[in-house]
Amino acid sequence: MNSSVLAQAKGMRRWFILALLFIAIETSFEVIIPFLMSDIIDVGIVQRDTSIFINRGLWMVVCAIGSFLFGLLYAKCAAKASARFASQLRQKQFEKITSFSFENIDQFESSGLITRMTSDVLVLQNTITNGIRPFARGPLMLVLGIGMCLMINPTLTLIFFGAFPIMGLIMTWIVSKVVHQYQWIQKYVDVLNSVVEENLIAIRLVKAFVRKDFELERFDRVNSDLAALNEKTNRYAFLNVPAFQGSMYAVIILLLCLGSGMIIQGTIQVGELTGMLSYVLQIMNSFIMMSNVFLLFSRSLASHNRIQEVLDQQPTMVKPKQGQVLQDGSIVFDHVSMKYAVDSEESVLEDINLNIESGSRVGIIGATGSGKSTLAMLIARLYDLSEGQLRVGGVDIKDLDLFELRNSIGMVLQKNVLFSGTVRDNLKWGDPSADDDRLLWAIEMAGAKELIERLPGGLDMELGQQGVNVSGGQKQRLCIARALLKNPKILIFDDSTSAVDTKTDAKIRKNLASIPNLTQIIIAQRISSIRHCDQIVVMDQGQIVQTGTHDELLKTSPIYQEIFESQQGGMQDE
Amino acid sequence: MNKTNRTDSSVNQHQQRKSALGQLLHYMGNHKFEFLFVAILVTISGLANLIGTYMLRPIINAAGDQKMDRLATLLITTIVIYVCGVIAAWGYTQIMARSAQQVTREIRHDLFKKMQDLPLKVFDTTQYGDLMARFTSDVDTVNDALNNAFASVIQNFIQSAGTMIMLFVLNWKLSLIVVGFYALMLIYILIASKISKRYFGNQQKFIGALNGYVEEMIAGLKVVKVFNHEQASIQRFNEYDDSLEQASERALSYSQTMVPVIVSFSYINYAIVAVVGGYMVLSGQSDVGSLASYLVFVRQAAAPINSVVQQSTLLLTALSGAQRIFDFMKIEPEIDQGNVTLAYGKKDPQTGTWTESQTLEDGWVWKHPRANGSYEYVPLQGDVRFEHVNFSYVLGKQILHDLNLYAMPAQTIAIVGSTGAGKTTITNLLNRFYEIDSGSILYDGIDIRLIAKADLRRSLSMVLQDTHLFAGTIMDNIRYGNLSASDQECIEAAKLANAHSFIRRLPQGYQTQIGTEGSSLSTGQRQLLAIARAAVANPPVLVLDEATSSIDTRTEKLIEKGMKSLMDGRTTFVIAHRLSTVRNADCIVVMDQGRIVERGNHEHLMEKKGYYYQLYNGMFELS
C-alpha cells in the first residue's frame, strides 16, 4: 500500500478529472464569446443586419450561461475532491498515529502531531482548491491563444516562442530560490510557536520570577529571525511580478515594432495586429497563472513533507505473524536490559532477573527514576526491551499476539487520563459490552462506590476534556475501575493510589485480593501500599537491589529500611 | 425587541471590523513612508499599464498611416512608460516584502508583550489552543493579506477607475449599462461573501471539534494503546472527520462558485453592450472602430472585479484574524499601580535607620516614596500578614473567607488541607496573581497593592505545583531563578536540592538539553530542578507549593537537609500533601473550604485530635 501523500488522492481521481474537464469546457465557452462578438461587428454592422445582433447576442448569453453552469459543476467537483483529499489525509494520519508504539510517540511532540493533522492538511487543501482552476485554465488559454496567433500570423507568433524559455528560466530560478526557504520558514514558525506555547504553559512561573523582559527578548530573537527569513523569501518570490510584467511589455513592444514594420511593408493588416495584441494579455496571463500555481505548490511543499513524515514513520514494534496466546499470569524477566535510545549511554534497566508467579502479588518500590515504570511498561510490551528475554504467560513476549497480550493486562499508568464523555463511556473502554451492573461491580472494587453516588449524575456525569472535573483521587479510582473491567490476568498499578487516602487504599487492596488468579504488580511510593505483597522488589538506578517480603527486607535491606523510616509517622497503615 | 438586538450587534460588528482595519492601518502607520511609497509605485505601475494599453491604438494607426516620425515617438514613449511601470513594480514588491514583515513582526511582538501583562484570570478562562491561534493562524492571515492584498487593492482600484474613465470618455451612454452591471456584481459580492463567511464559520466549528478530539486522543495515546482502543478511536475520529469533510465541501463549493458567477455576469454585460453598441453604430451614434476598442475596455473592466472576488476570502479571513488579534490586545492588563520598589540597603549602625546604597551591603530595603518627594526605607524582612482576606476567582463563588494569617520573619508556615480548601490560592494572592475582594495583605507592614508587582514578586521565590522546564540546558533552567547567577552558584543550588548527582549522570551534565516538556526527566527530577531554581533566586520569602509531591520519600529525606538550609532565615510557606514534610513547621494551618479550621504546631494539633489528626492518619483524601 502506497503511503505517499499524493497517493491519498487516488480515490478522488474521477472528481479531479471531472473538475479539470468542466474547467476546460467553461474556458472554451469563454473563448467562443469574442468570436461571436466579432461577428456582430464584422458581419452584422457591415451588412447592417440586425438579426445577427440578436442572434449572436443570444448565443453569447447562452455561452455565458453555459460557462456559468460548467463553472458550477466544476465548483462542486473541486470542492468534493479537495475536501475528500483532506479528509483522507487526516484519516490516514490518524490511523498511523494510533499505530505508533510508545517509542514513536516519544519522538513527536504532541503539538507537532496536531498541527500536522490540522493546519498542514488545510494548507494542502487550500493549495488544491486555489490551484486547480489556474492549473487547468493556464495551459488551455495558453494553447488556444498561441493557436489563434499562429492562425493570424505565424511569423509574429515566433516572438512568443522566444519569450517562453526566458520566462521559464526566470520562473525556475525564483522557485529554486524560495523552495528551500519555505521549509526553513516552517521550521522557524515551529520554533516561534514552541516559545509561545512554553510561555503560555509556564505563565505562572514567568510571572513569579518576573521574567517578562527575558521572555520578550527570547521571543523577539525568534520573531526577528522569522521576519527576516520571510522578507528574504518574499524578495525573491515577489520578483515574479515585475519579471512577468516586464516580459509581457517586452513582447508587446516587439510585436509593435515588428508589426508596424510589417504594416508599412504591407505584409499584415491593421486588424490582424490588433487581434494579436489582444491575445498577448491572455497568453501572458496564463503564463502568470501557471507560475503562481508553481509558487503555491512550492509553498505547500513544507506541509506536504511534514505530513509525509508521519505517514512514513514505521511503527518500531515488530508484531509476530502468528501470535501466541498467554497461558497464565506468570512473568519472567531473564537478564533484561533496556535503553530508550540505542545511542544513550545509561541503561534505564540493567540485567533484571525476576520471577513472578501467576496469581502472586508483587510490590515494586524505589527512588524516582529508578526504572520502576519502565519495568512495568515492558510487561505490556509498550516498549521493546534491548537485551535479554521476557516471558509473559510462559511465552516469549515477542511471540505473543500483541492484541491478546494487552487485552490480558489491566494497566493503570502513572500519567493516566480520562476522556471527555460520561463516566460510563470512560469505563467502557475496559469492556465495551459491560452492563451497568458490571460497571458498578468494578467501581465497588476500585473503592469508588460512594464516589459514584456523590457525583452529580452518577455514571452519566459528563467528564471534561482529560477528566478535568474530577479530583486526583477520584480520577485514580475511576482509572482502576476501568482497568479492572478488562478482566485481566495481570494487573499493573503504576503509582495508582498515590492520591487516594490510606483507608480507601487498603480497601481496594482487600477487594483485589478476592479476585482469583490475578497477578498484581504494584508500584508505589508508600510502603503501606505494598507491604502485604508476596514479593517486594527494591529498585535503585535501574537495577533490582533486593527482593523479599516486607519482614525480610526490613531486616536485610538498608534502602528499604530507610524508606520505611522516612514514612514512619504520618501515612501509617490503617 | 429581538430584532433590534440583532441589528445592534451587527452594527456593532461592523464598527468593530472598521476598528480592526483602523488598528491595522495604525500599525502600517509606523511605516507610513514605506507604505505611501508603495502606494505611489503601485499607482505608477497601474497607470503605466493603462496608458500603455491606450497607446496601442495610436501606434497602430500611425503605422497604418505610414507616419514614421510619429510612430517612432509613440513607440519610444510607450517603451519609457513600460520601463517606468516595471521599475515601479519591482520597487513596490521589494519594499512591500520588507514592510509587510516589519508590520507582522511588530504585531507579534505586541501580542507577546501583551500576553505577559495579562492577569492570570485570562489564562484560566481561555484555552491555550485559542491563545496560540492568535500567534499562528490569525497573524498568518494578516501577513498574507499584507503581502498580497494591499498592493492589489490599490491596483484594482486604479485599474477599475481608469478603465471606467476611459469607458465614459469613449461612450458615456454605453457606459451606463456597464455601471449597472458593476453595481449588480458588487451587490452580489457583498451578499455572497457574507454567506460564504457563514459557511466558513461552520467549517471552523467542525475544525475546532476535530482539533479537540485529536488533542485529547494524542494526549491520551498511551492509554489508547494500553486498552487496545485504536479501532474505536479511529471510528470516532472518522465521524468527526466526515462532518468536517461535509462542512468543508459545502464551504468550498459555495465560495468556488463566486468566480464563475462573476465571469458570467461580465459576459452577459459584454453581450448586451455589443448588441446595443451595434444598434448605436447603425443609427449613426457611434462608429465601428470606437465600438471595437470600447469593447476591449469592457472586457478589461471585468479583470479587477474578478481579482477582488478571488481575494475576498483572503481579505475577509484576514480582517476577522485582525479582529481577534486586536480584541486580544484590548483585554485589561494586570493592575500594577504600586510605587514601592526594592533597593539595596545600608543600615546605620548607630541610629539603626536604613538608607539606600549602591551595592548590596546590609540587605534589601523597600523604597517607599512619600508625598513630599522623599523616600522612606523599610528593611525587607519577610513579615507577611493576611488580614480579613476574602477572595473569589469567579464572582459569587467565594474561595477564602475572612482569612487571617501571620508569618513572622524566618518562620515556616505550613498550610494543609484537602483539595479545593484554598491552599494554593493563598500563595496566588501573596504574589498578586489575583486581586483580593476585601481585606488586606501586608508585607513588612506595607499593603502589597502599594508595591510594584515586579519588585513584590522578585522578593518571593516560588516552587510551583506544576514544574515547568524550558527548552534549553539544565544550567539555563536553574539560572532562570536568577539570571545573574554564575555557573558555580547554579551548581551549588543543584547540590542543595540534591539534583547534582542525577545531573552529573546525564549525557552532557549541566549542559544537557531538555525538551520543552522536560520529557526525558522524571517528575521527581524536575521537581528537584525547580527547587534548585528557587534556591538560586535567593529571596527572603519562599513558597513551596507541593514542591516534593513527586519525590520519593527517601530522596525527600536526602534533600531535607538542603531544604532546611534553604528555608533557614527565610519566611517560608509550605503547602504539602504529605504531612511528613510539614511536621517541623513553626505553625501549621489547617484549611477546609476556604476557612482556617485549626492552627498550631504538630504536637499541639495532634493532641487536639481534630482535623489535622484525622488528616495525619490518612482518613481523608489529600488531593
Image (spheres, coloured by chain):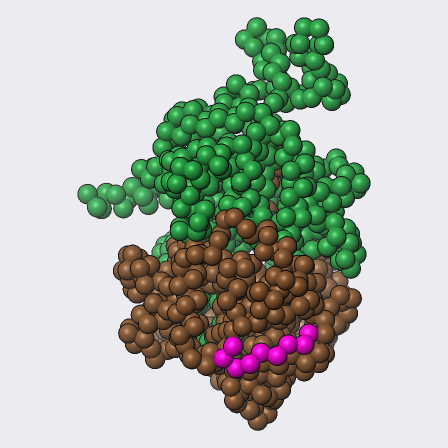
Chain colours: A brown, B green
Q: Residue furthest left?
A: B1
Q: Nearer the viewer, residue B131 or B96?
A: B131
Give the number of callouts.
0
For residue B124, say whether it is visible: yes
Q: Residue at x 75, y 72 (%)?
A: A342
B70 lies above or below A443: above
In the rendered image, the quadrant that contains the N terminus of chain A is: bottom right
- Does B271 sit left or right of B457 as displayed? left
A179 lies above or below A388: above
- Does A173 sit left or right of A558 as displayed? right
Q: Nearer the viewer, residue A192 or B445?
A: B445
Point out residue A64 in the picture as x, y percentages from the top left corner. Answer: 41, 72
Please check the rendered image and state whether residue A380 is part of the magenta-colored stretch, yes or no.
Answer: no
Q: Nearer the viewer, residue B435 or B390?
A: B390
Q: Residue at x 67, y 38 (%)?
A: B535
Q: Which residues are magenta?
A: A352-360
- Does A182 sit left or right of A23 as displayed? right
B529 lies above or below B67: above
Q: Nearer the viewer, residue B159 or A400?
A: A400
For residue B83, say whether it is visible: no
